[in-house]
Image (spheres, rainbow, N blue to C red):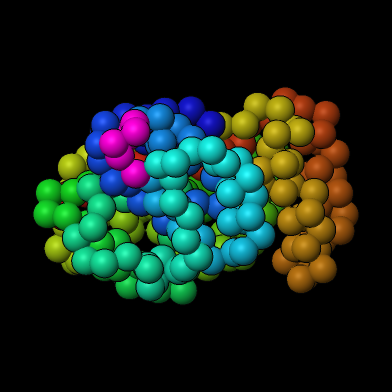
């Protein structure tokens, strides 16, 4: 997704810095960060999932400037004021205490350090179809399955309350124009089936809705927020 390029530019990672990727997953972004900080810098990937960390170690093997640690964004295994940059990418939507996570990141950032967050606002999800009611019910159902569905729009307030200064806020429209990609990311088939089982959608309405979407054209999307805050 092209938001990653905008996200990287906004975080302004440079040579010699220490960068934290909280919730690094299978090292999707660690190689890029390691290149940006160079041999004098360090990238620290933290994740709670041992399987993700195992994959991350495989992908970053041979990169001496990458350190991987098991831990949680609510209790980062790092000392106070130890990193220059920190990032979370689609992590805060899932944590049980987003305010606690933002505060914990501020703890480990040095004075003047930057914290970049990339989070969706699932409450903005829209799927174009003549049956507007079914599209709305589907969107509400999907948003309801996320722990913090409106975290994208909440990032600024949460950061200010934690003592950060806001550097930038950028909304990014995420748009899907083909059924396959929309189905993969939004779970059109699987989530409509779940909505039927939950009694939110009727089987006939969901089936007709999916048949129309499968035949195209598809227009579906939501808003993503990129926020950079300064400690």
At 18% from the left edge and 42% from the top edge, which residue is drawn?
Answer: 167
Nearer-the-camera pick, 188 or 211: 188
At 41% from the left edge and 66% from the top edge, which residue is drawn?
Answer: 73
Q: In x, y percent, where is residue 16? A: 25, 36
Q: Work out whether residue 158 can be spotted.
A: no
Q: Work out whether residue 193 can be spotted.
A: yes
- As displayed, is residue 185 above or below residue 74? above
Tell me: 83 left or right of 130. left
Quadrant assignment, res 208: top right
At 79% from the left edge and 54% from the top edge, which residue is drawn?
Answer: 190
Quadrant assignment, res 220: top right
At 70% from the left edge and 52% from the top edge, which residue is drawn?
Answer: 134
Quadrant assignment, res 49: bottom right
Report the label total: 0
Nearer-the-camera pick, 212 or 26: 26
Tell me: 214 left or right of 26. right
Q: Does the stretch in magenta take in 179?
A: no
Q: In x, y percent, where is residue 15? A: 26, 31
Q: Please identify the dominant SS of the magenta region.
A: loop
**Which image quarter is the C terminus in?**
bottom left
Q: In x, y percent, where is residue 193? A: 81, 58
Q: Which residues are magenta?
A: 37-42
Q: In x, y percent, where is residue 99? A: 32, 69
């Amino acid at each position: 997704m092209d938001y990653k390029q905008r996200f990287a530019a906004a975080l302004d990672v440079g040579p010699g810095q220490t960068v934290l990727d909280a919730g690094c997953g299978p090292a999707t972004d660690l190689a890029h960060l390691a290149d940006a900080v160079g041999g004098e810098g360090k990238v620290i990937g933290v994740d709670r999932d041992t399987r993700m960390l195992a994959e991350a170690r495989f992908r970053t093997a041979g990169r001496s400037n990458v350190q991987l640690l098991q831990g949680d964004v609510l209790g980062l295994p790092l000392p106070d004021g130890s990193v220059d940059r920190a990032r979370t990418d689609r992590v805060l939507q899932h944590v049980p205490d987003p305010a606690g996570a933002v505060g914990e990141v501020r703890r480990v950032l040095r004075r003047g350090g930057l914290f970049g967050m990339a989070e969706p606002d699932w409450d903005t999800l829209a799927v174009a179809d003549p049956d507007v009611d079914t599209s709305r019910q589907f969107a509400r159902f999907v948003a309801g399955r996320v722990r913090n569905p409106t975290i994208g729009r909440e990032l600024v307030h949460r950061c200010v309350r934690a003592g950060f200064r806001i550097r930038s806020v950028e909304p990014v429209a995420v748009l899907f124009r083909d059924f396959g990609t929309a189905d993969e990311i939004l779970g059109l088939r699987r989530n409509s089936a779940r909505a039927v089982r939950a009694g939110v959608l009727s089987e006939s309405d969901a089936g007709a809705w999916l048949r129309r979407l499968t035949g195209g054209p598809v227009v579906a999307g939501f808003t993503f927020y990129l926020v950079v805050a300064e400690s």
